[in-house]
Amino acid sequence: SGPLLLVENLTKHYPLGAGFFKRPFSVVRAVENVSFSVDAGETLCIVGESGCGKSTVARLLMRLVDPTGGRVLIDRTDIAGLKKHELRVHRRRMQMVFQDPYSSLNPRLTAGQIITEPVENFERLSRKQRNALAADLLQKVGLAPEMTHRLPSELSGGQRQRLGIARALSLKPSLIIADEAVSALDVSVQAQILNLLVDLQQQMSLAFVFISHDLGVVEHIAHRVAVMYLGRIVELAPCEALFAKPVHPYTEALIAAAPVPDPTRVRLAVPVEGEVPSPINPPTGCAFHPRCPLAVERCRIEVPPLVPMADGRVVACHVRAPATESPAVAAKSGP
Ligand code: SF4
Ligand code: MG
């Protein structure tokens, strides 16, 4: 039946500095040619440093912004073609959980009102139905029934994030897009929320697009991982394979730089050096070349294509994942 979500060549450029003469001086290449799919019940994590375009991908999936190019299909429906009322229905299937639930929850509504509100945007509920729905959703996310009367300000960070999740679940979506959904929480609370998400996924066959800069979080919940660097996916691999053997030098550096929860695991050698370059004037060729210890001349000139590897991953790197070699290159590397 195909994937639940299919993203093809998604691109978003923002004009920058539309100045005095209303001419944009430049563009921010926030997302460049991003393609991936997500199956029902699957968790795809998108990982990368801040500014790599992962949050823009989330907004494009929700169609909160329109793409410059490419398309997003959910259940084979192109969301670019949806009319306003169809978009409403589409958004029922795709819900978002944000980093800071506090800023996304109405401070004047009680928990019960917050989590039943999305449903009430679609249908009228009697008081009895509303109470039953609130009780059911609170229970799903592990909150006590009496929480229904609390205001967001009376809840802890973890409780508020549970509330954000309950609200996202209220419309029975098939896909949840979570943008740094646990990043603001203490580590122990993070683990509880991640376990809750995994439980809910199994119960409800939910798919997640889980966006995070934190590899520890990603390793905990991902089925597959897409690594983004300056607007592009540079490696997309099954989670275990990615952590066991990163192929792209940037993936390798990210994993090497992450705190290692398991001290017996061997650290890799390459540190990520240098600042993240700006997406306004990204480096030519492979955008990672100014920071890459393996860079060769070609890296400064040609953007490496994503090349499928034998173990099912795709990698964009001239050195680690060379595209079908030209005779000239083959001759050079021969004996
Ligand atoms: Fe490094 Fe070149 Fe590979 Fe880019 S293409 S990651 S610069 S070796
Ligand atoms: Mg972000």
Image (tube, rainbow, N blue to C red):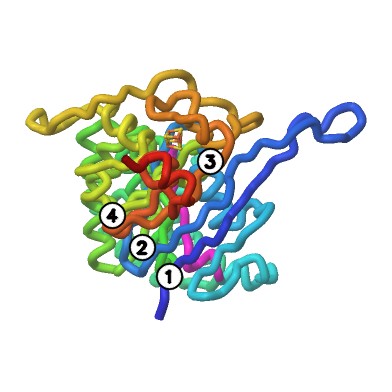
Quadrant location of the C terminus? top left
Quadrant location of the N terminus? bottom left
Between 76 and 281, the one lying in front of the other is 281
The kind of secondary structure element at disc 1 is loop
Q: Residue furthest bottom?
A: 1
Residue 100 belongs to the span the image colors magenta: yes
Amino acid type assigned to the residue bearing label 4 in the image = Pro
The kind of secondary structure element at disc 3 is loop
Tag 4 residue: 238
- Compare marks 4 and 2 and give the one earlier in the sequence: 2
Q: Is residue 83 left or right of residue 222?
A: right
Tag 1 residue: 4
Q: Residues within 10 Å of mark 1 (few under 14, many from 20)?
A: some
The structure residue drawn at horizontal position 41% and vertical position 49%, both measured from the top left corner, is 178
In the image, is the residue at mark 3 within 8 Å of ligand 2 by its beta carbon? no
Q: Is residue 253 above or below residue 330?
A: above
Q: Residues within 10 Å of mark 4 (few under 14, many from 20)?
A: some
- Give the percent coordinates (x, y) of residue 111: 40, 50
Q: Please name which of the two marks, 3 or 2, marks the residue nearer to the observer.
A: 3
Disc 4 vs disc 2: Cβ atoms closer than 8 Å?
no
CA–CA distance in space, label 2 to label 1: 8 Å
CA–CA distance in space, label 4 to label 1: 18 Å
Q: Quadrant of residue 203?
A: bottom left
Tag 2 residue: 207
Q: Residue furthest right?
A: 21
Q: Please name which of the two marks, 4 or 1, marks the residue nearer to the observer.
A: 4
Q: Residue furthest front?
A: 335
- Give the percent coordinates (x, y) of residue 331: 42, 45
CA–CA distance in space, label 4 to label 3: 21 Å
- The label shown at residue 81 is none
Tag 3 residue: 53
